[in-house]
Image (cartoon, helix red, strand yellow):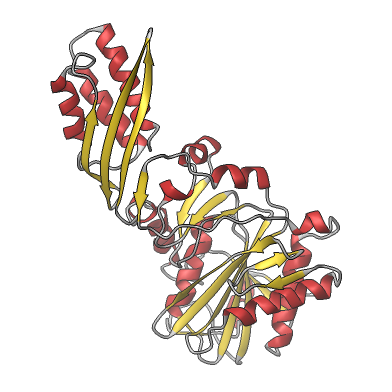
Amino acid sequence: MVLRSSLKNCLQLSCVLRTPKAGFRSTTSGGLIIQSISNDIYQNLAVEDWIHDHMNLENQQVLFLWRNSPAVVIGRHQNPWQECNLRLLRQKNIKLARRRSGGGTVYHDLGNINLTFFTTRKKYERMENLKLIVKALKALRPRLDVHVTDRYDILLDRQYKISGTASKLGRTTAYHHCTLLCNADKFVLSSVLKSPYKGLKSNATPSVPASVKNLFEEDPSLTCEMLLDAIAEEYATQHQMDHHITLINPADETVLPGINNKTKELQTWEWVYGKTPKFSINTCFSMVYKDSVLDVKVDMDVKHGRIEVCNIDLPEQWLPPALCSELVKSLTGSKFCPSETTTLATTLLRVCPQDDELHSRWNLLCENMLMLM
């Protein structure tokens, strides 16, 4: 049985910090296990940043346990348009986050466990962490067929991926984090991690698709709490420390000074979308208007999430060239996102001649442009 303490006991945690005013204090070496009471992806990623930036890990290591409400998390060097269905995320109100580690895109919900192992850079060892998880799973359910691959994935029944890995190596500290699929919504997972965007060319790091399975499909008697406790217990055993989990509130500035600024930064458009490596879109779409079908060609270069170059090729008789030119001019330099494009299109429409036919064609074009985003 793993005991949990509340935040009231944070001042007694065995942890040395570089920040004198921080709420954690140290009395012993060894290890520390903390668990977030938040299910917010941005808050939990901020905790990772905070620990990486402020904790002294020379004499001890840290295991951070966390779970999130539905979210898609992309790697530091990835392209969200390439990795997921952004339109579906907006429809389902699923958050999109960019983490500071590399690796591929993952879907989180409350049926998914996240584990972050913090060490010094010298002691960083992904394989050992994953073997620890496998050992904990086998101790809990000996019949589970789970093993670690050379790609640092954990497979179930030799074919289904239940855990993916990513990491961040700092100058002196490092962390390795991984997921563990327990009872995630696989239908939502497969839907949101399928990009509908065509004609996209990018040098961003692509994700590697894999067949996945939930642990609960293999053994319905399991719970997320059981798995968290088993992993925490194995971690405690290997680090010769008490079987003890400390609960932490990622919004508590008295314990984690400056944490809220880190959380806010992770939510900004400039971080989530603006950090996307430069990419281009070369695509065509067909618009059905009355009894005719019109083909439109669009070419765009997008840098830092903003449209750097834009060309829209459509017949002159369908839309006045001056109006199309104004749209291209307005889009150039703007954010590659539906809300900003909608605002620009609405503004331009106000200065158009009061012509119902023209307005209908304009709205149809803009609707199709939004589908690219």
Position of 175 relative to 184 (above/below) = below
Question: Where residue 251 sits in the image (x, y, percent)?
Answer: 51, 61
- Compared to residue 175, the image places residue 47 above or below, namely above
Of 194 and 64, nearer the camera is: 194
Front-lying residue, 250 or 136: 136
Compared with 226, 233 (above or below) is below
Look at the image and tell me in which quarter the C terminus lies.
Answer: top left
The residue lying at 26 percent from left, 38 percent from top is 299
- From the viewer's side, name the closer residue of 262 and 289: 289
Give how far across and how far down residue 322 sits, in percent.
13, 22
Q: Position of residue 220 (x, y in %)?
A: 84, 55
Q: Is residue 3 visible?
A: no
The residue positioned 38% from the left and 7% from the top of the image is 291
Query: Residue most toward the left?
Result: 322
- Camera-side residue of 178 and 322: 322
Query: Visible in this render: residue 103?
Result: yes
Question: Quadrant of the image for the N terminus?
Answer: bottom right
Quarter residue 176 falls in: bottom right
